[in-house]
Image (cartoon, rainbow, N blue to C red):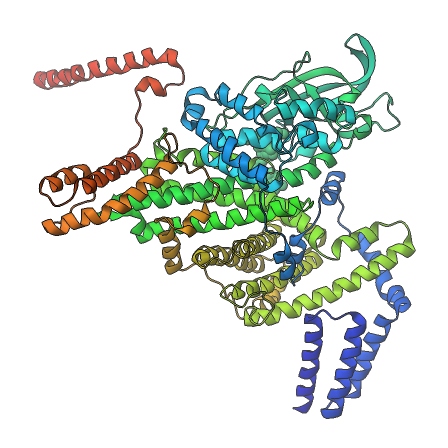
Amino acid sequence: MATTISLLALVAVFGTLSYQRASLAAFTGAFFVALAAVSYFGDISLAIWIIAAVIAIPLNITSVRQGYLSKPILNGFRKIMPEMSQTETEALEAGTTWWDADLFSGKPNWEKLHNVPTPTLTAEERAFLDGPVEEACRMADEFEITHKRADLPPELWEFLKTKGFFAMIIKKKYGGLEFSALAQSTVLQKLSGSSAVMASTVGVPNSLGPGELLQHYGTKEQQDYYLPRLAAGDEIPCFALTSPEAGSDAGAIPDFGIVCKGEFEGKEVLGMKLTWNKRYITLAPVATVLGLAVKLRDPEGLLGDKEDIGITCALIPTDIPGVQTGRRHFPLNLPFQNGPTIGNEVFVPLDYIIGGQEMAGQGWRMLVECLSVGRGITLPSCSAGAVKMAALGMGSYTAIRRQFKTPLGKMEGIEEPLARIGGNAYLMGAASSLTTSAIDLGEKPSVITALVKMHLTDRAQKCAIDAMDISGGKGICLGPNNASGRGYQAAPVAITVEGANILTRNLIIYGQGAIRCHPFVLAELNAAALNDDRKALQDFDSALFGHIGFAMSNFFRSFTMGITNGKGSAAPFKDETAQYYQQMNRLSANLAFLSDVAMGVLGGSLKRKERVSARLGDILSQLYLSSATLKRFEDEGRQQDDLPFVHWALQDSLYTAEHAIDEVLRNFPNRFVGIALRAMVLPVGTRLVRPTDKLDHKVATILQKPSAARSRLATDMYLTEEEGNPVGLQEKALRDIIVAEPIFTRICKEDGVRRPFIYLDRVADVALAAKQITAEEAELLKVAEEGRLRTINVDDFAPEDLAADKSLVNQLNQDWRDRANAAPKAKKQVKAKKEVA
Ligand SMILES: Cc1cc2nc3c(=O)[nH]c(=O)nc-3n(C[C@H](O)[C@H](O)[C@H](O)COP(=O)(O)OP(=O)(O)OC[C@H]3O[C@@H](n4cnc5c(N)ncnc54)[C@H](O)[C@@H]3O)c2cc1C
């Protein structure tokens, strides 16, 4: 018994030292002090001392440790090291890690998160948002754009160009706006609440495209020529990477360029003959300058001895003979300018390469580096904006629309999707804001931008489906009064572009995250790749033993916090949010521990086990979204009224993270390891639950009534109450109805009838005549009725207004008339036949 207690005491000391991540020297010292104490007071055999000494002494003598442990492991590691293609290596090396590395560490430093400065717009950015952005939202008639013109109207194009919408990322010295990432995001969120087509049109030149590439890699001449022209809107850019044969696998483009001499503008110059067939290129049909990615070859050795130079990005004016643009694709009834471009042996000088001749072959690196920024702004912001608008739009709609004499929003079944939209609106705003903070701090957080792109577009799609389900026929019937149908159509576009979501979730987030965010794996890989064996051994030894300590610590942290659900672990606040920080401490340790085991057991094949990788990535992603939510809550002054949103967002994402752990364990390729891991990571089973019905009710209730919390949810959105803005007008209708309802209820009570809340204008007339209400009250009822009808009514059209090909309208109408005329005749014929019979 005494021996058992002594051994348990030693295990506890070992566990505590691991949990606290003591250094090897401190660990050894403290452990031997504990061993001495336990031997003195308890019962420890000499064998334990011998085992401890045999392990500890070689570990603490560097030359012995390196020579007898690290060296053979390094040799073995070199043999099984996963092979990486050039494009994978470049993708891995692009960008930086930031808060994602903390979440991956098993021990996030919450102080670091909360020390990130609270994001704020400059006075100039604020003025732009309240001025030109508000005006652009007013000018964009989404139904006219999507249905009648299949384009933005010319005056809106002109407005966007001249006010600098396409130059938000371009530096002031070139005439651009040089806005912060936060400002770009806020502008795009507001635009997307008004028109998805306009937001896409503005998003692309400010994301990955010629502007971004030129600023980072362009030669001085290229920058001086193009950037002022792009800033002034004199050039419309696009960027063409995707081709019919290479979509997700963009590195496999078959488009090529051959270095050769040729004649250009009357002179013989060194150049390249380009052949390409690209599709899906946003803005290509109207572009004046085409950013083009091709694989460059130099068969004649004109540039050196390398024949396959690699992916190269060039800027091609679209008026050069042979450049074909102009035709359009039709992306899901959201006709932003998008189309194919083709070129066959188009000769251009080598200085058309972005960055000039020396950047030939550097295209892939350029693209992944730039993508890591733009991907975190454009699509996540458009998604967040759309969901914020849906939260207010669906909130007001469900408060106004009644069935069974009850507002839709009071029905439990509606509360569920409504709460999902509300909770997501808070979380998505938070995630956009934290991500743009990172970018504004100079980071290029490639893992974070991939995960926010994937998860925010995914959540937006789910919210768009929820909004459609809630609004029923009102969402289905397109027209100027429909605020949800186009968002529903837009969702798959955002899912597919800038890294299609399935691929991003299964390959990119964790694939890059595990190597980049892990504190030791990249160091081990780099060390193993070194040619200098001495240096390789030193670096590998330091990374390896850091790694072992890290894994041991995460094992103990996972196990103990699995029992306590993180209770007692570090949390920067002692209020109702403390539980979430503590649960995240636990989930972070789980992620780190599971990652080490998965990498250890599966090795290079983890890359091919996409579903394991996707779920591990989900844990990281949900931790990021959760921490962004807590950061927002703090940045906005810990508004108590916002707590239902905070609770909803945290409970939803942490539940999803834990569910991902459960699924990793259930589907772990090695069943035995899966079962053993479950005992270590979920020793008492899963602990977290989805948001309760009661919490859904609280969130749904906030959305249905004006309040500060509700307004904060949609700060800086286009909610102006004016013609052409159905959500803005619905806000007014909601307020009017809230004022009118008590008057209506009073009349019903006096009459002793429970009337449906319709015909408020007629009720007003009758009640006024009966002197039950004043003239002002009658007016309030009438105004409310007007808003109510505008909210619930849908658009209808003359048949010819819906036909895209007007030349067919007359023919179609004639066909219908013929069928109508034929119908009674058919009946007569049947009757005649019967009579004959
Ligand atoms: C409206 C629109 C605008 C666009 N704008 C541009 C632009 O301006 N410039 C440009 O260059 N390109 C643009 N694109 C192209 C876009 O980036 C590609 O559509 C995207 O990369 C996916 O390629 P794909 O459509 O060929 O799908 P595919 O590559 O055929 O993929 C189909 C599905 O398979 C999944 N998948 C593929 N590989 C894997 C894997 N290894 N594991 C798991 N799942 C996988 C994908 O996630 C996707 O769900 C645009 C596309 C659209 C639709």
Count of numbered marks: 0
Image coords of residue 509 (percent x, y) = 63, 47
Name the residue at 83% across, 11% down.
268
Q: Which of 244 and 103 is in front in this view?
A: 103
Ligand 1 lies in which image quarter?
A: top right
Q: Residue lying at the far top in this picture: please name it.
A: 266
Name the residue at 51% across, 47% down.
428
Image coords of residue 693 (percent x, y) = 37, 58
Image coords of residue 549 (percent x, y) = 74, 67
Image coords of residue 773 (percent x, y) = 15, 44
552 on left or right of 131: right
Residue 651 is at least partly visible in this image: yes
Q: Is residue 606 placed above or below 483 in the rendered structure?
A: below
Q: Is residue 485 placed above or below 617 in the rendered structure?
A: above
In which quadrant of the rendered view does residue 180 lie?
top right
Residue 466 is at least partly visible in this image: no
In which quadrant of the rendered view does residue 263 lie?
top right
755 on left or right of 300: left
489 on left or right of 291: left
